[in-house]
Image (spheres, helix red, strand yellow):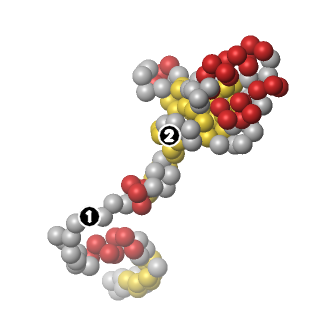
Amino acid sequence: METMEHKQPSGMTETQVEIPQAPDRIQNLEKPIENQNKPVEPTASQNNPNISENIGDVTETILTFKCELCNLNETYDFFGKSPPWSTKIVLLENAYICKDPFTIPQKKQVLILGSKCSVCEIDVCVSPKCSLFFSKRFCKHCAFKNMTYFPTQIQMKINKNFAS
């Protein structure tokens, strides 16, 4: 901060006034703009969807879920068992969750995109072609490898959905 002395008319005492410096981004506005016709390059967040983008004083992180089996790629809002905007929902597994874009926000409904396989920990979506939930989430490869440990009805489901 700069300090500036201010002289008062005769008969009054001098006072010191502190003048705050402008932040760098405001000071930089006084400099001439170079290369005004230069093409705009994409920001880091446009190249990588999991990077934070700083807009003014607000930082927004874009979170992206990708199923490693079918390549479903979608943004999500929360990873865990109970999303903060919907206190009535508690899942049995940590899952990638997004706010349901097809309902009005006041209903606070969610879409469960996927989770991590409990054996190999890859990200898998909830599609019956990619994963199975039986007390835990299993990708199709781990379910098939461990099929003998599942009940007979689940083994039939594994054979039907994951036979390839």
Q: Nearer the viewer, residue 2 or 102?
A: 102
Give the side of residue 134 with respect to residue 131, left or right: right
The nearer-to-camera label among 1 and 2 is 2
Residue 151 to residue 7: above or below: above
Q: Which label number is shown at residue 133?
A: none
Q: Residue furthest right?
A: 149
Q: Residue at x 66, y 38 (%)?
A: 116
Q: Tell me whether circle 1 and circle 2 mark residues in contact (CB < 8 Å).
A: no
Q: Position of residue 18 (x, y in %)?
A: 45, 77
- Residue type at numbered disc 1: Val
- Residue type at numbered disc 2: Asn
Q: Secondary structure at mark 2?
A: loop
Q: Residue at x 67, y 21 (%)?
A: 159
Q: Residue at x 30, y 64 (%)?
A: 41
Q: Position of residue 25 (x, y in %)?
A: 37, 70
From the image, tell me which residue sits under label 2.
71
Q: Nearer the viewer, residue 55 or 93?
A: 93
Q: Which label number is shown at residue 40?
A: 1
Is residue 157 shown to the viewer in this render? yes
Q: Position of residue 6 (x, y in %)?
A: 38, 83
Q: Nearer the viewer, residue 32 or 90?
A: 90
Give the side of residue 116 with respect to residue 40, left or right: right
Task: Give the quadrant of residue 114.
Answer: top right
Q: Residue at x 22, y 77 (%)?
A: 34
